[in-house]
Image (cartoon, rainbow, N blue to C red):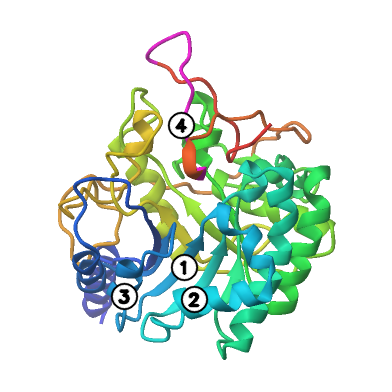
Amino acid sequence: MATTKFLLSLLLLVQLAATAYSIGVNYGTLGDNLPPPAKVADFIKTQTNIDAVKIFDTNPDIIKAFANTNISLTITIPNGDIPKLIKLRTARRWVVDHVKPFYPASKIKYIAMGNEVLHWGDDALKSNLVPAMKTLHNALVREGIKDVKVSTPHSLGIMLSSDPPSMGRFRPEVIPILTQMLRFCRQTKSPFMVNPYPYFGWSPEKESYALFRPNNGAHDKFTGKFYTNMFDGLMDAVYSAAKAIGFGDVNLIAAETGWPSACEFPVCSVQNAVDYNGHLIKHIESGRGTPLMPNRKFETYIFALFNENQKPGPAAEKNFGLFKPDMTPVYNAGVVRNQQGGATPGPTMQIPTRPSTPAGPTTPAAPKRGKKGKPAGPAKSTTPATPATPAAGGKKP
């Protein structure tokens, strides 16, 4: 009996070690050497456990390529098109042109109204954001499409503070817009999308905390909650900010998060990228949730599917991919079925018996940002081998 139990336990451990975890991914196309959409869709369907894809436009070739794959899609309306969509007639025409030709064969789940508009947009664009979301929702319903939700991703530049997580608050100037938006999300059962990047919170002292490695953790003295990783802290900060204005019930999605495998600084490395993404995927799949949102499996989209050689900005921008353009893995994060070899995540965090005690609430500093709403990575410091400290979660001034 003892031998049988031992063998069963050993078999379970082997199965767990070989598990590939389902996850969403951002599919960018700023490269001159990327495979065609049909080949990408077939690869994702047959070779990976990726079950959701987010794109940054409404490329019909990509949308069509995912028809009958059962992979859910998030498509994105360019920021510049937002003002036109406050008119119902225009919004209905947009649905007829960009959704109805592909739906439901292509499993369009979300439509993102722009990307990080409250970070990058001017006042006119920001003021049109929620009206356009409402109008597009009405247009979808009038065209007989009731299960496609409208949202918009935010950088954590919307945050006034994020540490400790329970004191997370939105910036005062965006609260009127976010109040309208969160009310819309509640009414339509749409998610609130945020882009948490612990990469921007990197510092030598916080590296292990950012990468899910063993560390001293952080204790929130206001709630008594203990944090083992920065991702949970950022998500709980957003939750606290939403709850503070009356919307703690709205579902959160991590629409972008990731770590570059190469750049001019040591913070970018294959091991750092595999530690972050590999442990993140396991953490999400565990369903443990966060200290303030326990027992939840967040819908999460890794940035990005491919390394993209034509992305503007520093080297990190070109090296966020899980895969090379030839579709071979950059490292083994656990998304490829039956993958053997490659860099794999190191030890993960275990809760220590004596948590550290942090200081009170702080306001994160501002990071530099890349074009098209993507993180630019750590700024150059006076010491070539060491990056300057980016902001926690991608903070905008």
Give percent across and percent down for residue 181.
74, 63
Residue type for callout 3: Lys
Q: Secondary structure at mark 3?
A: helix
Q: Earlier in the sequence, mark 2 or mark 4?
A: 2
Q: Identify the residue under disc 4.
A: 377
Alpha carbon of mark 3 to alpha carbon of mark 4: how far?
A: 33 Å
Q: Which of the image's four quarters has the C terminus?
A: top right
Q: Which of the image's four quarters has the N terminus?
A: bottom left
Residue type for callout 4: Gly
- The reply to whether residue 307 is visible in this rendering is yes
Alpha carbon of mark 1 to alpha carbon of mark 3: how far?
A: 13 Å
| Residue beneath the point at 52% across and 77% down | 95
Q: Secondary structure at mark 1?
A: strand
Q: Which residues are magenta?
A: 373-385
Q: Identify the residue under disc 2.
A: 109
Give percent across and percent down for residue 116.
59, 49
Between marks 2 and 3 in the image, the one whose residue lies nearer the viewer? 3
